[in-house]
Amino acid sequence: MKKHVEFKNHQREIYHFQLRLIVSIGFVLVLLAILLVRFFYLQLLRHNYYQTLAESNRIAVVPIVPNRGLILDRNDLVLARNYSGYTLEINLNKVTDMEATINDLSRLVTITNKDRRRFKKLLAESHNFETLVIRNRLSDEEVARFAAQQYRFPGVEIKARLFRDYPLGEKTSHLIGYIGRINDTEVNQLEESDLSANYRGSDYIGKTGLEQSYEADLHGTTGIEQVEVDANGRAVRMLSLTPPVSGNTLVLSIDAKLQEIAEQSFGDFRGALVAIDPNNGEVLAFVSKPGYDPNPFIDGIDPQSWDELNNSPDVPLNNRALRGQYPPGSTIKPFMALAGLNYHTRSPEQTINDTGVYYLPGSSRQYRDWKAGGHGLVNMFKAIQMSCDTYFYGLATELGIGNIYNFLTRFGFGQKTGIDLEGETSGLLPSQEWKMKRYQQIWYPGDTVSIGIGQGYTLVTPLQLAFATATLANNGVAYRPHLVKEVRSSRSSEARFIAKDPLYDLNIPASQLDLIRRAMVAVTQPGGTAVYASLGAPYHIAGKTGTAQVIAMKQGEKYDAKNVGERLRDHAWFIAYAPAENPQIALAVLVENGGHGGTTAAPIARKVMDYYLLGKVPKPLTKADVQESGAHD
Amino acid sequence: MTKRQLWLRFIAHLDRQLLLGIGLLLLTSLLVLYSADNASFDRPLGQLRNIVVALACMWLVANLPLHYLMRIAVPIYALGMVLLIGVALFGEISHGARRWLNLGVMTIQPSELMKIGVPLLMAWYFEKHEATLTLKNYFIAALLMLMPIALIARQPDLGTSLLITASGFYVLFLAGLSWRVIGGLFVAGIASAPVLWSMMHEYQRHRIMMLFDPSQDALGNGYHTIQATIAVGSGGLLGKGYLNGTQAHLDFLPERTTDFIFAVYSEEFGLLGNLILLALYSFVVWRGFIITSHASTYFTRLMAGSITLTFATYAFVNIGMVSGILPVVGVPLPLISYGGTSMLTLLLGLGMLMSIETHKKLVRT
């Protein structure tokens, strides 16, 4: 019985076990099916997706930054160049105690307080995951010393890089500008204009001057190297290479030597000079004094030096030639005279009697001539030669502000010239509409009077005045002023020329131009206001002096240069072109607080013209040489 | 005795079909290790040494008569428990877990021993009480299983404790644990999940969370899963070709000679290679089930079934983890991942299968 039960149990047990075994096999089959479905999903359905992920894992695209284009003057003299050198850079991710690291480093290489301050500023501005430069331009000895100790400094490395250098320094600062590290705003701008791809790997971008306005030419095209990388980001081998294309070379119309002479001629004075070839608009010299050394800006200037520049009363960072706005003073007179001829307001022969004072009809308000007692009988020629104010008070009143506005607009007053630099200001040529809009006031006849002698609301930039002078010199045919003559392609021998064709022709009758020219030549002859300008010159100079008031004189008050502070003295203007019969150069010179145009501004113009036309190199000039300022206009 | 007779005696207890499957898997291991080690013979040679030692042990076990297996069950289990308690008291800490015991001459991981010790003891226990099995016996067997598992889970080694739980559960299941109890356990398991969750270590929770969204921690814990999944997926139908896997050879795959070796294989041999590998595993498992069904005693049936199911589970868990459907637990790919301990444990188990198959025949004749 017992045995029977056991046997039966055994059979049943076997049966139950087999059942459980079959369930187990089913379980394993389910596991198998799960894996098969997963493989099918990963390796067939989603294969392309994972293939792409694997490829992007494997392939790193390394940008190769192109060499920035050179900037040369018209004689191929280098104004901006690249040179290779070493920098010491710190990877922010790998260095924890920055202060200690820098202190240790300073025992190996020279790290000045300036370097530290500059680095701190960069650190404050930096994004994460960056390397920052602690020292530039290491000497070979420093490189060797650091290399031997490099193992002590994880995250600090020496990199060979190309540096930008401006050999002429502050002489060309307002012209060339500088490059600097790309900031957040510029990153956004690049993104908006779809240029960020071309700036991958680029650290620098043009910030001001030609470096900024010709950024597209100078930057070049970034090359692409595709490399296979391992999980640590180390390159294993190169897969493909698209070489970078260097930036194009800018050849300027600027004559570096002329620029230098113009710059030096200012001596200790502040001011601006723009010289233009009237036959094509090429800018020959473009000076704003004082300048600044652009080189420290490239890798971020240290805060102290920046404060010095920024807070200096001389405002060296202000581009006076491009952005400085001054009353034109008497330099407006030749253009006013042309307006009078154009509208037949006054004939050349028509004379007025200058008693030294002008009254508006029915008014007792005095408008005084700069010369007490006046110039007597004056026609248009004499009015320009002697810079007679009374003549132009009347002429302006007779012309009316509408005609003045219309005519001067044609010479480019009140508008940007469109020169190839960013940030140009447009000056101000007032009109009735402008005054209403600006002051909600109607235009009074009294407003027109002082417009006639370039005072009142009118403001011009040295560049504008040079452009107007060049247009006048070229018989009313205007060329857009430009600093870059040609852009030489780095790929081929092709060159792109800037602004070959004239902007417009004002169609001024030759007889009118001739009268103005003769009168302007007379300005620089005995009897004129700028005799010194052409003393001993073997060519004729057509010029006009001007004075821009810094402080307004009250009725009846007399301006006395000796009684006002130096910075409140009048600004001196001189515009000129030469040779008068066949003009090769036209210029405008502004000397801030220079007093009278004939004594301070004209000699600077003369030196520039002498060098350009005759190749004459002047002696250096100091403030003392021109200190005997005669106070008349 | 002639040479031939000697040879026959030598192979008498080796199951040829099982040996064929094992041999092909071991060959695959050497092949893939050569690639995973960047075409170096370093790892393949090391693995060859592991294989030789483990195969020798397998041969020994295969020649062991069945009653010996029964007899060593209790000592192995007892030794395992002693060592586990030793680990808990004096174990060495590495990677934040106390798993190793330094015996002076060598360091051992007692949890590996329990992979065989637990099912062995449970099978022995059921054999002892075969005639009078009641629910109480299942309860005691479960208790015997849970004691070492609790110690291992405390180390903490969640992966190993789960796998031992699985192999113990297979014994319970094959021993005929009633479906109602299984259902009850299942419900209780789900109900206790929140409790378990709260008891888990932070890194264990992290690994489970990662399974749902590996990209959450792409550079940390999710990195393994993401890179392995990319490797498998980019392998496609036919794979990138032997030695051409970019994920493996450019260092994107972590632990690619050990736990993640399947990703290397799958990237280079694609879906087709995967099907072949699954076929090899299936063949071994199938043979295991055949042996189980032949097994002559209650003990050997339970033991053979548990070994076979555990083997299948290891393969599934490893492949599932590499292809991103299971959390990353430290389970090697059976017979392929580099490593002496797991090779030894697995081949010992398979040796037992052979012993069960061949000694039964001898008993019959």
Image (tube, helix red, strand yellow):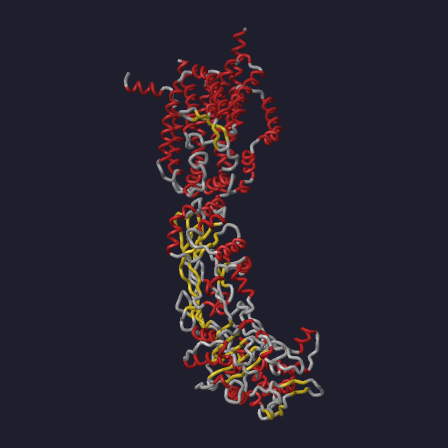
Q: Residue A558: x and y, percent?
A: 63, 82
**From what the image shows, is residue A136 above or below residue A602?**
above
Picture coordinates of residue B312 (x, y %)? 48, 28
The one of A595 and A537 positioned closer to us in this rendering: A595
Asked whether B11 or B165 is in front, the reply is B165
Task: Determine the image quadrant of residue A189.
Answer: bottom right
Q: Is residue A499 something that shows in the picture?
A: no
Which quadrant is home to the N terminus of chain A? top right
Query: Residue at the spot x=66%, y=75% of the render?
Result: A434
Tally of marks: 0
Left or right: B277 as drawn, with respect to B195 = left
Residue B113, placed above or below residue B39: above
User: Residue A184, position in %: x, y?
Assistant: 55, 57
Q: Quadrant of residue A369?
A: bottom right
Residue B195 is at least partly visible in this image: yes
Relative to A74, is A128 on the left or the right?
A: right
- In the image, residue A588 above or below residue B303: below
Q: x and y percent of residue A629 in the render? A: 54, 81
Furthest residue in direction left, as rendered: B2
Q: Nearer the viewer, residue B221 or B62?
A: B221
Question: Which residue lies most toward the right here?
Answer: A362
As drawn, the residue found furthest toward the top would be A1
Q: Which quadrant of the rendered structure holds the C terminus of chain A?
A: bottom right
